[in-house]
Amino acid sequence: MARRTFSHVVGFDDGSFDKYRQATVPVVGAVFSGLRLEGVLCGRVRTDGANATRVLTQTVASSKFAAQLQLVLLQGIALGGFNVIDLHGLHESLGLPVMVVARRQPRLSKIREALLTRVPGGVRKWALIEKLGPMEPLAGVHVQRVGLTREEAERVIRRLAVNSNIPEPLRTAHLIAGGIARGQSRGRP
């Protein structure tokens, strides 16, 4: 089997939001060819909703970049609070590998408690998280992956993590989403 390079990647992150006042949250995708930013995708998801997988699928599939993309990177498994992404569903609908990247291991017990006691559809959302299993440490970050091997995931992270441990498509999406949501970017992804 030929070695996959994943030269065309999109990284998604959401903008900040007030969970008590905002019904939708901006989501930004930074499309990269190697280390060059090629374009930006935008969408919106409902706060604590159930439309993240559909929005990401439509955003990618309807974009002019769809035919070239080889990998989807996500900054966490949920957007807009607890709008949990079905990684297997996203992988199947786009036909692309999907990888979640986080700086540190999430506190699953706290996430489980919040989902099961305070979030509409929390049982289904928790089942999506449980289905993936725990994040695995890899190349200075933690990942969950569907459709690519551990070795491929490590190569992607090492190649794209230039200015921090976070791959550039995710770092860039974070900066753009922050600028859209607050008028200026700040902080680390």
Image (cartoon, helix red, strand yellow):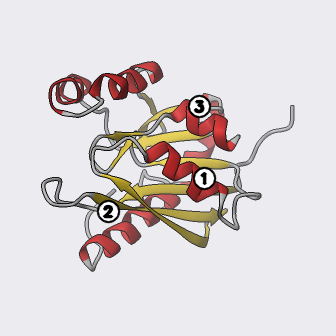
Say which of marks 1 and 3 sits in front.
3
Q: Residue at x 27, y 80 (%)?
A: 183
The outermost residue toward the right is: 1
Across and down, in percent, residue 108 comes to: 26, 25
Disc 2: which residue: 15
Quadrant placement of the N terminus: top right
Residue drawn at (15%, 25%) of the image: 117
Q: Tell which of 39 and 83 is nearer to you.
A: 83
Total marks drawn? Answer: 3
**Mark 3 residue type:** Val
Hey, what amino acid is under mark 2? Gly
The foreground one among 39 and 148 is: 39
User: Which residue carries the number 3 mark?
Assistant: 146
Q: In terms of sequence position, does the residue under pointer 2 or pointer 3 come before the other?
A: 2
Residue 51 lies, in percent from the top left, at: 42, 45
| Label 3 secondary element | strand
Find the distance from the CA under tag 2 to the CA under tag 1: 25 Å
Is residue 28 visible to the viewer in this orientation of the structure? yes
Circle 1/circle 3 CB separation < 8 Å: no
Q: Nearer the viewer, residue 182 or 156?
A: 182
